[in-house]
Image (tube, grey):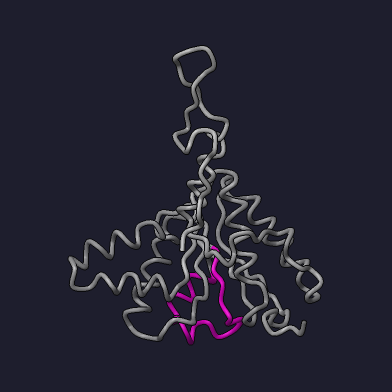
Amino acid sequence: MMLPIPECPKCSDTLWVECRDTRFADRCECFAGHKLRVLLQRAQIPERYSSVSFASFDVTRSPDSAAAVAACRDYGAGLGVGEVGGLLLTGPPGSGKTHLAVAILRAAIERGVLASFWDTQHLLDSVRATFGHDAEQSETALLRPAVEAELLVLDDLGKERRTDWNRSTISALINERYNRRRATVITSNYAAGLADHVGDRIDSRIAEMCRVVRLTADDYRKREL
C-alpha cells in the first residue's frame, strides 16, 4: 500500500500560487518538498513502517542493537556519494530488520535517491499474476523498478516458497543489480544457511555484494505490556 500524500492547502498540489497584486503565478513553497513526497510515494513503503527512523529504533533491545544502527547509518550516509554495495540484515522475526531497512531507505530518499521497497514474496506474486496476459512484457515492466532503483530494499528473502521459478526470478533480479553495482538492502530471518532457501548462486552473489549486519533482539511483537 502506498503512503497517502496530504494535499498542500495553499496550492492544492498544483505547485503554483497566484502572486499578490499581479496576474502571474509563482512556485508554491511546497515545491521544494514535492520531489520528496513523490519519491516516498513511489518507494511503496508499507504503511506500518511509514514513520520509522533511526531515531525511533530502541537501541536498548539487545547488546548488538546500537552497533547495528550505527552500521546502517554509515551505509545510508554513503548512498549517492560513491560506489556502495549492499547490506544483509539478518536476525529472528521481530528483531528490527525491516525497521532499519526502511530507515535507510527514508534517509536515502531525503537526499533525492530513487529507492524502492519490495517484500520478496509480494514481488514474486505480482510478477506471477501477469502470466497469461502478455506475460513477457508485463514481467519485465514489473521488475524494472526493482532492477533500476538506485536503492532497493528486498524484505524477507528466504521466506518465499521454494520453487525453481521463484529462485530463477530472484536470481535474475539480484544478478542484474550486482552487474549494475546498485545499492541493495536485503533482510532475512536466516543468519546462516541462506543458501538452503535461495540456492547457492543467489547466496554467492549476496555474499559478494553485501556486508552482514546481525540483530539478536527478541521479537518485539511478543514483548509483554
At x 69%, y 75%, the residue is 215
Q: Furthest-top residue in view?
A: 21
Q: Quadrant of residue 126?
A: bottom left
Q: Is residue 77 above or below residue 179?
A: above
For the record, the magenta segment spans 185-207
* Of the pair 73 and 123, the residue shown nearer to us: 123
* Of the pair 35 and 115, the residue shown nearer to us: 35
In the rendered image, residue 132, in percent from the top left (x then y), is placed at: 18, 73
At x 55%, y 58%, the residue is 85
Magenta stretch: includes residue 191: yes
Q: If the image is split into quadrants, where does the C terminus sit?
A: bottom right
* Of the pair 218 and 21, the residue shown nearer to us: 21
Counting every numbered tag in the picture gives 0
Q: Quadrant of residue 73?
A: bottom right
Q: Is residue 33 above or below residue 129?
A: above
In the rendered image, residue 203, in percent from the top left (x then y), is placed at: 49, 76
Magenta stretch: includes residue 163: no
In the rendered image, residue 88, in percent from the top left (x then y), is placed at: 58, 70
Q: Tell me if 86 is positioned left or right of 143 in this view.
A: right
In the rendered image, residue 134, in percent from the top left (x then y), is placed at: 18, 65
At x 39%, y 66%, the residue is 173
At x 63%, y 54%, the residue is 76
